[in-house]
Amino acid sequence: MISAIRSVLRAGFGLIERPFDRLFGPALNPLAQLGALGFFFFWIVAVSGIYLFIFFDTGIERAYQSVENLTQYHWFHAGVMRSFHRYASDLMVVMLVTHLLREFAYDHYRGVRWYSWFTGLPIIWLLYVSGITGYWLVWDKLAQYVALASSELLDWLPVFGEPIARNFIATGTLTSRFFSLMVFMHVAVPLFLLFIMWVHILRISRPKVNPPRMLAALSLTALLAVSIWKPAISQGHADLAKVPADVGLDWLYLPLYPLTTIWGNGAVWAFLGAFSLMIAAMPWLPPLRRAKAVEVHLDHCNGCARCAEDCPYEAIRMVGRTDGLPFPTQAQVNPSLCVSCGICVGSCPSSTPFRRSEDLRTGIDLPEFPLKELRARVVETASGVSGAGRLLVLACEHGAAAGRLEGTVVLPCVAMAPPSLIDFILSRNLSDGVVVAGCAESACYNRLGVKWTEERFAAERDPYLRARVPRERIATIWASALEVRRAEADIAAFAARVAQLPPLHMQSPLPKSIVAARKDRARADAGNEP
Amino acid sequence: MSGVLRTAGQFVAIVALFAGVAMLSSWPRWRQIPQDSGVMMLTFVHGADRKGECRRLSPEEIAKLPPNMRRVQDCPRIRRSIYVELDVDGRNVYRADLPPTGIAGDGPSRVYQRFVLRAGKYDVAVRMRDTARADGFDHERKETVAFAPSQLLVIDYRPENGEFIFR
């Protein structure tokens, strides 16, 4: 059931992400910047809130009037700030909901990612409490409705001696102190929200908390345009002798309020409880089965720290040397944080398939899919590729090429392949070209796999792809599992291009051990034939 | 696509999204009660009498108590339930036994009930029993009220005066 919903959502995101990628480019695609945009809108809300507080009066009679004054007479600065405050808060909800759905769709919430998912739950609650307390402060008809409905909802819980809602049913029962309390809550809760937002990203390496400048500038300009086009306004002074019967509701913050009338407060609490419980339990419904965590082989580790730098999950840290070798540090893996993506294997300078030792080993390796096995699969797969424009595809198991049968080696992440593997494939004449096919750029399953691969190939990040490797024989295809047709078309086009290229003269022989193994296998295969 | 055109396209896409969000922040409107209706609310917080009478402790019983907890009387904490009825135009719309609140049952009883009524004139009668009597009522009020659209009519009880108020 969960998996079916996830598939539908993933298909939905797959449909909208490609047009967004085309329009914005992978770097600016807002769908890949949801968390960062959430932080960005938080800061807009914070700054505009501080500005508005200068003009806000916390009295029962003066609160509404002060908000009206800034909206009517100071619209060009304070009024715009009010709209910024309102719409940026609403946009935080949009970012939060989309972020939650997207992480769910791409299965980014199980395994070691449970922590970020789980800490996202208090963020939802705190964001809504922050927004709802803000609506009370204006003290217009909507505020009256929100105050009454919220307190009736709270009164359903057997906690309060006297119904809080009785404060909002008659003039004279409400004092200015109430507004001081609400202002305190409207400041304290967002501060706590910010703290939890920090906790939320604690276990993420290189979290994106700032969107690209261009996207931020466009968002700010768009917010200004919308604030001028449709300024946030009040809905008339609250009148406790009347029912706020007809209100313009903020459907992003208050969608459950009508349900308190339709379903009843008990049902709304049941819904909220069930929703929270479900979100909290989802990382274990069912738990993610994962391969064994990477292991450090100290005899091949020089403590260069590239693996720790590249790990997207903060699963590796550098500690003091324990084996007496003349290096100050060594890598240490926290298995509970490792997702076995293999990115660290690709980053290790010892991970070179050119090594001629019998037992190919590297500084950090996946026990269930070691570098030796990767090299063997590459050699094995290449032996089955023939004809003009022979291609070998190194495919991410989450991308479009994962289901290919011919000429394809599937990896947990394309960044697991060290750049020297490409050099190895071409220089050993295992194929005429290499395709590296990963996830969609804006939706890399392991967050940084696409980025690291591109930077390594561009010689911007260690380990570099050597300059001698002809770039025209390498293609990178970033496509989600839903874009198989496009990926196949790109692979076919690349194969046709490679077929036109002159023969490659960078061959060097395979290590003797591999040649011997191949011969043994060929002999065994021949012996098995009837 | 040229750089300027592309940026313009990005801006339009973002503005469209933000405009949608701005629209949703106050539209569509929500009407919680029908147009020509108002709300009558029966709400009060009132503690009924204690269930049992206070009993004077004997000198022996007082002596048995720890020195810092000695008292002359032993009063049961638990209160009685309150029975309340509300009639509108002679038709009973609400009746309930309101138990005392609190873990020990020594808190006041409370009621908070909304009734949506069409605008018009109504004969409203509210009655309450908060003592040990088996039938009849200790407090009662009848009134004809003119009910306007969107009006919030509160029927409250003032324990200090021992009477219901309509406001």
Image: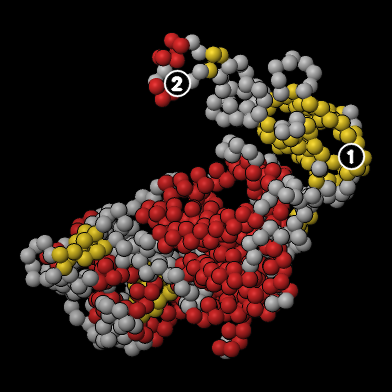
Q: Which residue is mark 2?
A: B70
Tag nearer the camera, 1 or 2? 2
Locate residue A257 relative to residue A92 in the image: left or right. right
Q: Position of residue A330 (x, y in %)?
A: 17, 66
Q: Going 55% across and 80% down the picture, which residue do you hit?
A: A217
Locate residue A145 relative to residue A181 in the image: left or right. right
Q: Is residue A2 visible?
A: yes
Q: Chain of mark 2?
A: B
Between A472 and B75, the one nearer to me in the picture: B75
The amino acid type of the residue labelled 2 equals Arg
Secondary element at tag 1: strand
Q: Position of residue A227 (x, y in %)?
A: 67, 75
**Res. A206 image quadrant:** bottom left
Secondary element at tag 2: loop
Rendered image: mark on residue A411: none
Between A183 and A38, the one nearer to me in the picture: A183
The answer to which of marks 1 and 2 sits earlier in the sequence is 2
Mark 1 near mark 2, Cβ–Cβ under 8 Å? no
Q: Which residue is mark 1?
A: B145
Locate residue A128 relative to residue A292 in the image: left or right. right
Q: Chain of mark 1?
A: B
